[in-house]
Image (spheres, rainbow, N blue to C red):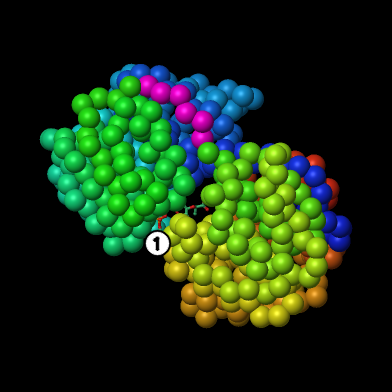
Amino acid sequence: MEKFIVEGTGEGLRGNVKISGSKNAVLPILAACLLTPEVCEIRNVPPLSDVQYMAKLLQELGAQVFFDEEKEIMRVQAAEISSVEGLYEMARKMRASFLVAGALLGRCGCARLPLPGGCQIGSRPIDLHLKGFQVMGAKNKQEHGVVELQVKNLKGGEIYLDFPSVGATENILLAAALAKGETVIENAAAEPEICDLADFLREMGAHVEGDGTDTITIQGVKELHGATHTVIPDRIEAGTFMTAAAITGGDILLENVQEEHLRPVIAKLAECNVKTEMTEEGLRVYRKGKLHPVQVKTMPFPGFPTDMQAPFMSLMTVAKGTSVITETVFENRFIHAGELQRMGADIKIDSRSAVIEGVDTLTGTKVKATDLRAGAALILSALAAKGETEISDIYHIERGYHKIDEKLRAIGAHIRKENKENE
Ligand code: EPZ
């Protein structure tokens, strides 16, 4: 199995990093390509394993997909939907496969998809997705681990989300674009990825308003046409590299970021005594003095992103003093704490809160990535640790971070990938 071997150098990272397109924006946008028989061209597509899975799923449903990985351009044409059944393997590998449900309902009124299972960070139910589809007239049947959705005439409706779920907001948006009449989503998610999907749907001819707020209104249209769209930069990859500069006491420049997507992370880093400044070339991130401990509470956007919780915990393990992290979005997202403790971190977990006492140094050892953000957190800790750290199960990390080892090496990190069979 492939592993990352990281040597803590004690030196701050320095140099420029180009941030890739957003994984969590491109996945729903690729699902949206099912809504038209015409060609869609998506640019700034990160060649991640999750993107490959989604492309494969679209092909199983009948779409033609051509991906120029060099240019990071993907062309999709779903001239015909030849199947409404997502294969079990694909859907089990990636929960975001369920995002094709809304698009299939909009395009052909039915979908048969494996129930996306839970994962390490939580049970990940889809009740809010199904509640939205039900309001729009779809019947759903769940048996043998498959959810079957059927609707004769998809119609708009008023949908209130008990929680501003990103996936549910996206799935309902995808179905509402071609539904008959008006759909209003209340308590909608307001993440930048929602706005990017809404931008793409508008470019296809959809009538969407209010994205980025808690109330989104969609006037259904008869059909949508092909469009060309450039995906927004990945704010979580950017936040991860910002935290890498912070934890190593470095000075880096992030190219291809949108500052307004990073406000919660910029604000929290400022509390930790980490400076940022937007320049012509991009966002400069640097630390001059000692790290300060902070209180962090993850919240839906524009709050502090849950996907940045694990990387931030790594940072707090070496900030002298007491920090407290509260995870309000997922019920089990502290698994990385155990691995960090093996590197010498002082962390106490009490249900949704983690109390962290900063230590002088972490020490390298063998650790395991349990999900992509936890894996990223282990890389950050390894960069700051004394000695060598071996990180296994790095396939988790490579789902959401394109060439993270190459990008880190280019700014001075001692990290390499090794293939250690049968270890
Ligand atoms: C998206 O997941 C992201 N994934 C996640 O990123 C991210 O952590 C999450 O949004 C929150 O920002 C993609 O965009 C592919 P949710 P999603 O629905 O849509 C509960 C990463 O690391 N909920 O907003 O699944 C749910 O249990 C990944 O890139 C219901 O109760 O997140 C959770 O507690 C991890 N019922 C909360 O809402 C539902 O029907 C937030 O989930 C749906 C969700």
In the rendered image, the vertical position of residue 152 relative to residue 302, given as above or below:
above
Q: Residue at x 64, y 25 (%)?
A: 70
In the rendered image, the vertical position of residue 308 relative to residue 156, given as above or below:
below
344 or 249: which is nearer to us?
249
Q: Is residue 336 magenta?
A: no
Label 1 sits on a secondary structure element that is: loop
The segment highlighted magenta reads: 226-231
Q: Is residue 388 visible?
A: no
Q: Is mark 1 within 8 Å of ligand 1?
A: yes
Rendering coords of residue 10 (x, y %): 86, 61
Q: Residue at x 36, y 52 (%)?
A: 213
Q: Residue at x 81, y 49 (%)?
A: 14
Count of marks, rendered view: 1
Q: Read off the residue under disc 1.
A: 123
User: In the picture provided, is 280 more to the left or to the right than 58?
Assistant: right
Q: Is residue 333 visible?
A: yes
Q: Where ligand 1 lies, by quadrant?
A: bottom left
**Residue at the left extreme, as displayed:** 152
Picture quadrant of residue 226: top left
295 or 271: which is nearer to us?
271
Rendering coords of residue 81 (x, y %): 30, 25
In the rendered image, the vertical position of residue 292 relative to residue 416, given as above or below:
below
Q: Amino acid at mark 1?
A: Ser
Picture quadrant of residue 171: top left
User: In the picture provided, is 40 more to the left or to the right than 111?
Assistant: right
Rendering coords of residue 50 (x, y %): 52, 40
47 or 4: which is nearer to us?
47
Q: Residue at x 38, y 28 (%)?
A: 203
Mark 1 Cα-neighbour bin, 10 Å: few <14, some 14–19, many ≥20: few
